[in-house]
């Protein structure tokens, strides 16, 4: 499952570098999607049953944005197989032009039917304890996603703005972006990432992104894996996954909590 490599064209890497995102179709087979989706459903059921908190922010506003389960790869071998898989990490390695990447964390993000809020426009990097800005996310659709289902939107080229202020992720509407953006970006039109299950997007940690509420009758299940290019250094910053790995300020990420994946063969 999830094996093999996924070679990109140089023009796809250049597109990612200039636009800050890339959409890739049919990265997982239908069988791989159903296996991963079933594993995520088990995790979501366990989480509800055990009332465990697997993603520390549980206030009402945030809870309606999505059910967030962080570092599920450590609890479920079936999810670990995906999160540490060579195919996804290989794409991240190519996009960052690094010799390999390290996992920062994974998280499953489920917007439940008719009971979700928008994910406000934001940049991920401003929440990550990293000195460099090269880390990126793979957002894998486990359901067919449309605007109505709460698919992702990106603001092309916004990664070139550098880090702006963090926002309240649960307090967002489509207009909230406009209030935070420098005037230079206000004419840029967001692009919508509708796609089939098994397709995915990669986005740079500084690329502004948004997802609307899920107003359909089915769940919107996404599996997100976040990778850092080799040689990324730790910066002390409070984060929802906690202060893992006993790293000190300026130390290079290393160790089994941040496994090296996607090494070129
Ligand atoms: C979402 O899936 O709604 C947002 C994902 C992200 O912020 O990376
Ligand atoms: Ni994000």
Image (tube, rainbow, N blue to C red):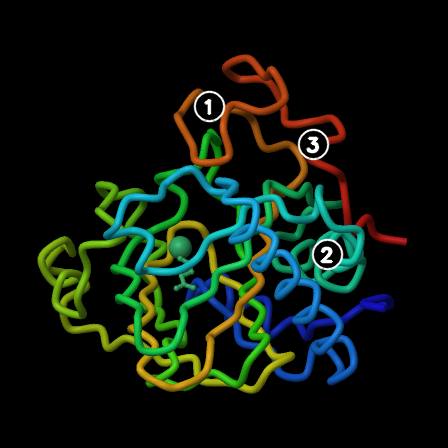
Q: Residue drawn 76% across and 82% down?
A: 29
Where does label 2 land, which residue? 79
* Label 1: element kind: loop
- Please tell me in which quarter of the rendered image ligand 1 is found: bottom left
Residue 44 screen position, x and y as percent:
56, 58
User: Which quarter shows the N terminus?
Assistant: bottom right
For label 2, the crowd category at 10 Å Cα-Cα, with few meaning under 14, some 14 to 19 and many 20 or more, is many
Drawn side of residue 90 relative to residue 168, left or right: right
Which is more N-terminal, label 3 or label 1? 1
Q: Is there CB contact under 8 Å for labels 1 and 3?
A: no
Q: Residue at x 68, y 41 (%)?
A: 102
Q: Position of residue 37 (x, y in %)?
A: 66, 71
- Give me the disc on residue 10: none
- Seen from the viewer's position, the closer of residues 227 and 114 is 114
Position of 18 compared to 119: left or right?
right
- Front tag of 2 and 1: 2
In terms of depth relative to the viewer, which is nearer, 161 or 84? 84
Q: Position of residue 22 (x, y in %)?
A: 52, 71
Would the CB of label 3 be found within 8 Å of ligand 1? no
Q: Which residue is mark 3?
A: 257
Residue 68 image position (x, y, % from top left): 46, 53
Q: Is mark 2 within 8 Å of ligand 1?
A: no
Mark 2 secondary-structure assignment: helix
Instruction: Name the one closer to the observer, 5 or 242.
Output: 242
Relative horizontal placement of residue 127, taking residue 265 as reference (left or right)? left
Dot in front, 2 or 3: 2
Residue 235 is tagged as 1
């Amino acid at each position: 499952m999830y094996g093999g490599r996924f070679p990109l064209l140089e023009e796809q890497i250049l597109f990612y570098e200039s636009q800050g995102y890339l959409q890739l179709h049919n990265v997982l087979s239908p069988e791989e999607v159903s296996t991963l989706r079933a594993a995520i459903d088990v995790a979501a059921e366990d989480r509800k049953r055990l009332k465990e908190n697997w993603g520390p922010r549980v206030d009402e506003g945030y809870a309606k944005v999505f059910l967030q389960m962080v570092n599920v790869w450590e609890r479920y071998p079936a999810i670990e197989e995906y999160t540490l898989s060579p195919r996804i990490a290989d794409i991240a390695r190519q996009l960052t032009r690094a010799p390999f990447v390290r996992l920062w964390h994974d998280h499953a993000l489920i917007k439940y039917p008719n009971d979700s809020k928008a994910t406000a426009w934001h940049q991920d990097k401003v929440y990550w304890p990293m000195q460099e800005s090269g880390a990126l996310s793979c957002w894998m659709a486990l359901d067919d996603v449309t605007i109505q289902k709460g698919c992702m939107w990106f603001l092309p080229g916004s990664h070139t703005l550098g880090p702006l202020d963090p926002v309240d992720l649960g307090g967002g509407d489509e207009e909230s972006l406009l209030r935070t953006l420098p005037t230079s970006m206000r004419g840029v039109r967001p692009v919508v990432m509708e796609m089939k299950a098994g397709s995915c997007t990669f986005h740079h940690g500084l690329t502004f992104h948004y997802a609307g509420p899920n107003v359909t009758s089915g769940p919107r299940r996404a599996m997100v894996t976040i990778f850092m290019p080799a040689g990324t250094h730790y910066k002390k910053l409070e984060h929802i996954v906690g202060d893992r790995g006993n790293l000190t300020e300026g130390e290079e990420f290393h160790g089994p909590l941040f496994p090296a994946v996607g090494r070129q063969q």
